[in-house]
Image (tube, rainbow, N blue to C red):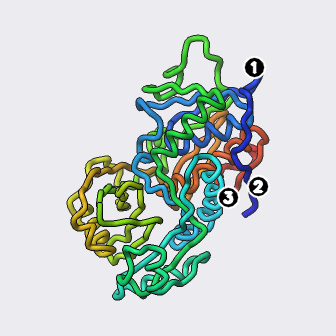
């Protein structure tokens, strides 16, 4: 699918010109922040409006932060991998200290057919035996005979990454951020603010007042603390009921995620989900059975019926939504496409379904 070539976020303009395009971003999650970055890099005067008291919350707060386009290719459409490769390059330049340790996919001996099925549905990996697994992750030595190693993938800590991106927007691009407002009509604007030339709506599930085909997919996660375990990279554990991933967060902390439940209730983690997440982590290594649970979280991710994200344009508003469980993997690439649409009128048919006569 052809698309404009990605650029890395190394340019640092002095600030927007007086006659710059005025852009209002609604929502301060990963979609809103990366859109603010994409527009600011092109010289726009950006105001970002967030209904919470800080950016990077909502479902972005509970993300795994895996930058794993090849792994996602196992169950997602090819466009997700395409967006993911572009976004992987973006994050490596946009925020500091992105670990480039790859991803490891494992399965218990009884589930090796699932590992072979996973391998058939993707690329970019090497088969590894028990000795290679032990070399990659010493604490897993002797526990698994086969696995898949995706050496070109990476991961990040979502909360730290979005905090760093927020600082970049404010300090280097003079982006204005207004908190505890939704940005609809005049909410969150100061008297005398000029009307926006372009509004970029990144409100997630809250945008169902306009995008009627959005649905909610609940995701649940845990953070464990263990002094007995060490991992360098995300490990996906193929489990018969609920495949999970374990992402190292440093200092003995591990994020265990995540369920995908077809409902839009933001309630707490269910007992069944906690048992299954902990059971899969225990199957990876018994040390997780003695780990301390330091956080339990759940939120609802916005998705369209086919689980592919979209850009939609209505008048001067561009909607960036439907990231499903691919927020960090897809958001930067979608943000660049949204800026190209606004500045250049460049259509992005791979993620747009409007009548092309509008262009």
What is the CA distance from the residue labelled 1 to the residue labelled 2?
A: 29 Å
Of the numbered discs 1 and 2, the one sitting upstream in the chain is 2
What is the CA distance from the residue labelled 3 to the residue labelled 2?
A: 14 Å
Left or right, residue 252 beside residue 322: left
Q: In this view of the protein, can residue 333 be seen by the observer?
A: no
Count of numbered marks = 3
141 relative to 8, above or below: below
**For discs 1 and 3, the disc positioned in front in the rendered view:** 1
186 vs 132, nearest the viewer: 132
- At x 38% / y 71%, what residue is drawn? 243
103 relative to 38, above or below: below
The residue tagged 1 is: 18
Q: Are marks 3 and 2 in contact (CB under 8 Å)?
A: no
Residue 58 image point, x, y percent: 41, 42
Q: In this view of the protein, can residue 244 be seen by the observer?
A: yes
340 vs 286, nearest the viewer: 286
Q: Which image quarter: residue 218?
A: bottom left
Residue 308 image point, x, y percent: 55, 58
Of the numbered discs 3 and 2, the one sitting upstream in the chain is 2
SS state under label 1: loop
The residue tagged 3 is: 350
Residue 102 image point, x, y percent: 54, 68
- At x 60% / y 77%, what residue is drawn? 123
Left or right, residue 297 beside residue 92: left
What is the CA distance from the residue labelled 1 to the residue labelled 3?
A: 34 Å
The residue tagged 2 is: 5
Of the numbered discs 1 and 3, the one sitting upstream in the chain is 1
Quarter of the image where the C terminus is located: top right
- At x 47% / y 78%, what residue is drawn? 135
138 relative to 184, above or below: below
Q: Which image quarter: residue 274?
A: bottom left
């Amino acid at each position: 699918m052809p698309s404009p070539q990605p650029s890395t976020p190394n340019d640092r303009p002095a600030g927007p010109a007086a006659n710059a395009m005025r852009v209002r971003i609604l929502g301060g999650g990963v979609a809103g922040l990366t859109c603010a970055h994409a527009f600011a890099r092109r010289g726009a005067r950006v105001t970002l409006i967030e209904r919470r008291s800080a950016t990077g919350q909502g479902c972005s707060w509970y993300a795994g932060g895996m930058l794993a386009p090849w792994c996602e290719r196992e169950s997602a459409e090819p466009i997700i991998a395409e967006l993911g490769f572009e976004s992987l390059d973006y994050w490596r330049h946009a925020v500091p200290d992105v670990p480039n340790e790859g991803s490891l996919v494992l399965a218990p001996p009884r589930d090796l057919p699932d590992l072979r099925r996973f391998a058939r549905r993707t690329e970019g990996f090497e088969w590894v035996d028990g000795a290679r697994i032990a070399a990659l992750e010493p604490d897993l030595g002797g526990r698994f005979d086969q696995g898949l190693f995706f050496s070109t993938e990476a991961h990040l800590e979502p909360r730290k990454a979005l905090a760093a991106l927020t600082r970049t927007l404010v300090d280097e691009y003079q982006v204005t951020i207004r908190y505890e407002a939704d940005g609809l009509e005049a909410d969150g604007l100061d008297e005398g603010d000029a009307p926006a030339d372009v509004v970029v709506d990144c409100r997630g599930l809250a945008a169902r007042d306009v995008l009627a085909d959005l649905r909610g997919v609940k995701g649940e996660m845990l953070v464990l603390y263990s002094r007995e375990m060490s991992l360098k990279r995300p490990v996906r554990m193929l489990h018969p009921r609920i495949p999970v991933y374990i992402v190292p967060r440093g200092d003995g902390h591990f994020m265990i995620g995540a369920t995908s439940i077809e409902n839009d209730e933001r309630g707490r983690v269910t007992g069944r989900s906690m048992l299954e997440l902990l059971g899969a982590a225990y199957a990876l290594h018994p040390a997780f059975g003695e780990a301390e649970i330091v956080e339990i979280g759940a939120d609802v991710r916005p998705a369209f019926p086919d689980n592919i994200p979209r850009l939609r344009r209505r008048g001067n508003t561009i909607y960036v939504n439907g990231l499903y469980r691919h927020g960090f993997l897809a958001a930067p690439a979608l943000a660049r496409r949204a800026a190209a649409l606004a500045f250049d009128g460049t259509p992005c048919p791979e993620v747009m379904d409007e009548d092309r006569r509008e262009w």
